[in-house]
Image (cartoon, rainbow, N blue to C red):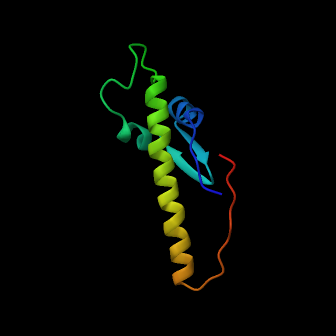
Amino acid sequence: MTPRATPGDIEWIDSYGQARVCGLIVHKATITGMERPGDRRSDGHLTAAAKERLATQLTRQLVSHDQQSRAAQHAAREPAIWRFCNG
C-alpha cells in the first residue's frame, strides 16, 4: 500500500511537535520547512488549504523514502520487508 499523510497528521505534528506517519517519525521542523507565506492564520494555526498542500508534499516524501528503501533492499539482495500503511 502507498504511504499517505493526511491533513490530520499535519495538524498533529504542528500541535505536538512530531508524529509517526506510516512508520516514520516526522518532526515539526519538516513541516515548517515546507510552509509558504500566508499558510498560517492570524491566530498562528495552519489554514485548511495549507494542511492539504503540506499533506500532499509529505506524502510525496514518504513515497520517495519508501521507494528508496525498497531499492536499497533489492540492491542488497535482502528479502524485502513489506510494511502496510492504511493512511
Which residue is at the far left? 37
User: Left or right: where does residue 46 sit relative to residue 37?
Assistant: right
Residue extending farthest bottom: 77
Task: Work out which quarter of the rendered image holds the N terminus and state it.
Answer: bottom right
Q: In the rendering, at what x and y percent does residue 29 appear?
A: 41, 41
Q: Is residue 65 left or right of residue 39?
A: right
The percent coordinates of residue 80 (x first, y second) are 65, 75
Nearest the eye: 12 or 65 = 65
Above-or-below relation of 66 to 30: below
Q: What residue lies at 47% left-to-right and 60% top-to-bottom?
A: 64
Q: Residue at x 50, y 39 (%)?
A: 55
Residue drawn at 68 percent across, 62 percent down: 83
Of residue 31 and residue 75, the one placed in the foreground of this image is 75
**Residue 2 pos. (x, y %):** 60, 55
Q: How many marks?
A: 0
Q: How far across and how far down the image is residue 28, in percent? A: 46, 39
